[in-house]
Image (spheres, rainbow, N blue to C red):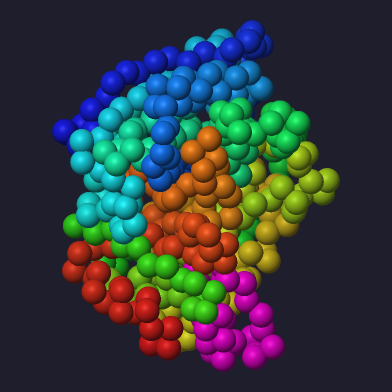
């Protein structure tokens, strides 16, 4: 852990009231092989004059215990089902982990820029769960007091239990319980819904899956030792796009669109395409190398009927845009934006059924060769999570690696911060291409 953070105490927090003792089956989407890791959020709060640190710690621990009553699977343990495919949660109030720590040198302003190394902020979540199926707690919360009186709250959540939307709903519930300034009558607590059977392939029915319609699960030839090329000597980067820059990207995308100038693209579509192109050009792949941009698509309202409000399980499938490095680099940002847009449009009820069959029966899992993953945290509302310390000054990951994150920018609801680690040799060109939408 090093000397940058010193742990004062680690506690097991169990639900504050009795909860069901049972075994709950996870869905086909929950059980996907590539989700067997921990989502790690880092929220930093500015110093609050006169803040009582011991009282704040006690409030957060109490709120966590209360939140684990309706969200009792977060106090359980995830394991493979002994009698078939998929995963399940053994719920016996085993508990989550709460850690209180003190930083030796970090201040709130240190989080304005990207970390110097991929794992610089790892001590802010000192219990890292590498294998989520070996009896580890699915939820870890660490409160670290910074040297200027600010607070960092890091949260690790087993991705098998929830997606980004579900984790944000839990954190909002936890925050409202912790916030003394929020009267009970004003709480917007959403009742959590389990119902994982809604996303499980029906027994006895087999969906005919056309592999060509699911490029996210197909393999592409590796022409350049891809993983070594994109994972060696990584340097975190952080670039913010405000409303003006996003509108400029949209204008350029329309002008270079192959769908005609009448085409309209969202901020996500143009920014994802721009990042993908800048990343590929900066690293420098062979022209014939197939590249993919993979991103999550929320299916809560794409199913008929839709999933119930409060469903906090994994309810997304992967969208996948695919082209050659040469086409991506030489054609305009409108070309990439169109690929992203069409990848989103392919997802409907039948597409989701095919994905469930693919991952349940065939154990389908995306191959990493050629892939840049983009995850949109900027729409989760993490910046509004207030545990009684105000809104978050900084929202980001605990570790910045080669997966690209779109992050919220405080007090600027339209702006997006793009954080990704790229090879050190490509950093200068990556910054150049990212800041120049016409290149």
- What residue is at 71 percent from the left and 42 percent from the top? 206
Question: In the depicted view, which residue is nearer to us: 414 or 389?
Answer: 389
Residue 61 x %, y %: 48, 21
Residue 420 in percent (x, y) is at: 35, 59
Picture layout, residue 162 above or below residue 437: above
Question: Residue at the spot x=34%, y=33% of the render?
Answer: 144
Residue 163 visible in the picture:
no
Left or right: where 24 falls relative to 397: right
Q: Is residue 101 left or right of residue 161?
A: left
Q: Is residue 249 magenta?
A: yes
Residue 193 place in picture, x, y as percent: 72, 31
Q: Quadrant of the N terminus?
A: top left
Look at the picture and state if 371 lies above or below 280.
above
Q: With respect to residue 232, does 157 lie above or below?
A: above
382 and 122: which is toward the camera: 382
Residue sitting at x 26%, y 38%? 147
Q: Residue 200: x percent and y percent?
A: 69, 35
User: Horizontally, is 316 left or right of 60 in the view?
Assistant: right
Front in this rendered view, residue 154 or 422: 154
Determine the residue positioned at 30% across, 79% down: 432
Vertical placement of 250 versus 175: above or below?
below
Which quadrant: the C terminus? Answer: bottom left
Displayed quadrant of residue 223: bottom left
Question: Is residue 70 visible from the viewing direction of this image?
Answer: yes
Query: Which span of residues is magenta-colored?
Result: 247-272
Please check the rendered image and state whether residue 32 is part of the magenta-colored stretch, yes or no.
Answer: no
In the image, farthest residue toward the right: 305
Q: Is residue 306 left or right of residue 60?
A: right
């Amino acid at each position: 852990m090093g000397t940058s953070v010193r742990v004062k105490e680690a506690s097991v927090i169990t639900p504050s009231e009795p909860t069901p003792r049972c075994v709950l089956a996870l869905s086909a989407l929950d059980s996907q092989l590539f989700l067997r890791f921990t989502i790690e959020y880092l929220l930093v709060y500015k110093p609050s004059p006169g803040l009582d640190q011991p009282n704040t710690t006690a409030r957060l621990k109490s709120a966590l215990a209360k939140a684990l009553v309706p969200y009792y699977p977060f106090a359980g343990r995830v394991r493979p089902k002994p009698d078939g495919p998929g995963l399940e949660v053994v719920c016996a109030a085993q508990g989550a982990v709460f850690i209180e720590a003190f930083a030796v040198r970090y201040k709130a302003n240190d989080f304005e820029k990207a970390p110097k190394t991929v794992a610089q902020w790892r001590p802010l979540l000192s219990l890292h769960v590498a294998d989520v199926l070996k009896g580890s707690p699915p939820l870890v919360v660490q409160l670290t007091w910074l040297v200027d009186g600010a607070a960092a709250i890091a949260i690790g959540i087993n991705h098998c239990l929830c997606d980004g939307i579900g984790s944000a709903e839990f954190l909002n519930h936890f925050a409202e319980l912790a916030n003394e300034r929020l009267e009970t009558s004003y709480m917007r607590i959403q009742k959590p819904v389990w119902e994982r059977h809604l996303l499980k392939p029906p027994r006895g029915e087999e969906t005919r899956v056309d592999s060509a319609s699911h490029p996210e699960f197909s393999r592409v030839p590796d022409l350049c030792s891809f993983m070594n090329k994109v994972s060696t000597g990584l340097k975190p980067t952080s670039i913010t796009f405000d409303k003006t820059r996003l509108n400029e990207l949209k204008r350029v995308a329309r002008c270079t669109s192959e769908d005609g100038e009448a085409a309209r693209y969202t901020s996500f579509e143009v920014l994802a395409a721009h990042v993908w192109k800048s990343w590929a050009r900066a690293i420098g792949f062979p022209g014939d190398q197939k590249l993919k941009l993979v991103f999550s698509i929320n299916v809560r309202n794409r199913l008929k009927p839709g999933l119930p409000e409060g469903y906090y399980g994994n309810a997304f499938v992967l969208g996948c845009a695919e082209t050659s490095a040469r086409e991506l680099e030489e054609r305009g940002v409108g070309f990439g934006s169109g690929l992203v847009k069409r990848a989103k449009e392919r997802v409907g009820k039948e597409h989701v059924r095919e994905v469930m069959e693919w991952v349940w029966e065939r154990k389908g899992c995306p191959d990493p060769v050629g892939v840049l993953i983009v995850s949109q945290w900027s729409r989760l509302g993490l910046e509004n999570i207030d545990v009684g310390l105000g809104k978050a000054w900084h929202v980001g990951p605990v570790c910045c690696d080669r997966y690209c994150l779109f992050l919220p920018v405080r007090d600027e609801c339209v702006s997006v911060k793009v954080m990704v680690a790229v090879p050190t040799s490509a950093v200068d060109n990556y910054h150049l291409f990212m800041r120049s939408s016409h290149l």
